[in-house]
């Protein structure tokens, strides 16, 4: 007969997996389009290819399932190269996130987020993809000209976060069916540390020299978009091992290529 602590661990793993199967965020299709980034060498819209993105950010329940299957990403085992000392600091132990399993996982590094995405056959969204979807509200794919849209985001940035973050499922969907791009947590992007690169070409390694302290607005494409300025500044301050109380992630994937039915 197995010891009680082993039986308890097996039961916990079963319950977690069952919960993940019931809650796992599903990818939704985002059509190709274009948008004007906050910082670019001109105001020419940047094309965004079709892709898929998770409906919600990753929850503690989902991340617990991941660390149970990948123990090297547990709090006491993770390499210090890949996560700072605050990694999963709000968890009670390596495999106990506490009772709020449906809250978004935070205190998670970029390296850990990428590992989670790879484990599930996904990736992190690029900054362009995230910002492209993040422009949407409940009725429009691009709500950035709506003062109320921007003010709601700024109000959230200025507010004190709740002691327990709510489930992302409680947030209303936007026009794509995506929930809580704003108003819940900040989210990692695949290329978060490329903020200072100005070009789109793979061969362009130019650095935007105007991004000095008071120069940010000089090279911005929309000086009214204060929320985008704040996201830009936050991303630029990060390193891949950093973890914070309000930083989590959601996953993305390339668009599915439909096979031709013609003979």
Image: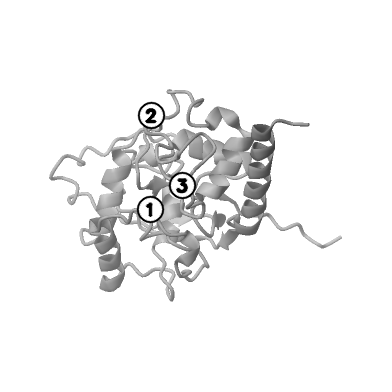
With respect to residue 90, does 228 lie above or below? below
The residue shown at (46%, 70%) is: 172
With respect to residue 96, does 85 lie above or below? above
Residue placed farthest to the right in the image? 263
The residue shown at (35%, 41%) is: 244
| Label 2 vs 1, first from the N-terminus | 2
Specify whether residue 39 is in view.
Answer: no
Q: How far apart are the two marked residues, 2 and 1, measured between alpha carbons?
A: 19 Å
Mark identifier at residue 84: 2
Mark identifier at residue 185: 1
Q: Position of residue 164 (x, y in %)?
A: 38, 54
- The N terminus, quarter of image: top right
> Is 202 displayed left or right of 246 in the figure?
right
> Is 131 displayed left or right of 257 in the figure?
left
Q: Which residue is mark 3?
A: 105
The residue shown at (30%, 53%) is: 38
- The foreground one among 25 and 31 is 25
With respect to residue 261, does 213 lie above or below? above
Specify whether residue 144 is in view.
Answer: yes
Describe the element under mark 3 as helix, strand or loop. Answer: loop
Describe the element under mark 1 as helix, strand or loop. Answer: loop
> Is 248 displayed left or right of 237 in the figure?
right
| Label 3 vs 2, first from the N-terminus | 2
Q: Position of residue 185 (x, y in %)?
A: 38, 53
């Amino acid at each position: 007969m197995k010891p009680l602590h082993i039986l308890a661990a097996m039961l916990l793993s079963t319950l977690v997996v069952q919960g993940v199967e019931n809650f796992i965020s599903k990818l939704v299709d985002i059509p190709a389009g274009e948008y004007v980034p906050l910082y670019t060498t001109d105001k020419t819209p940047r094309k965004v290819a079709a892709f898929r993105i998770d409906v919600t950010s990753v929850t503690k329940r989902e991340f617990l399932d991941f660390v149970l299957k990948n123990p090297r990403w547990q709090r006491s085992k993770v390499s210090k190269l890949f996560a700072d000392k605050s990694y999963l600091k709000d968890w009670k132990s390596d495999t106990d996130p506490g009772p709020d399993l449906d809250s978004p996982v935070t205190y998670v590094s970029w390296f850990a987020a990428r590992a989670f995405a790879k484990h599930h056959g996904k990736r992190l969204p690029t900054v362009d993809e995230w910002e492209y979807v993040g422009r949407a509200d409940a009725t429009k794919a691009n709500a950035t000209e709506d003062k109320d849209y921007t003010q709601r985001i700024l109000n959230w940035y200025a507010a004190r976060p709740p002691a327990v973050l709510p489930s992302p499922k409680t947030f209303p969907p936007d026009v794509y069916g995506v929930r809580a791009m704003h108003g819940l947590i900040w989210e990692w992007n695949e290329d978060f540390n490329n903020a200072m690169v100005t070009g789109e070409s793979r061969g362009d390694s130019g650095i935007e020299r105007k991004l000095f302290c008071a120069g940010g607005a000089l090279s911005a494409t929309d000086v009214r978009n204060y929320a985008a300025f704040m996201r830009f500044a936050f991303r630029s301050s990060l390193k891949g091992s950093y973890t914070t109380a309000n930083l989590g992630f959601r996953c993305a994937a390339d668009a599915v290529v439909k096979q031709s039915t013609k003979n």
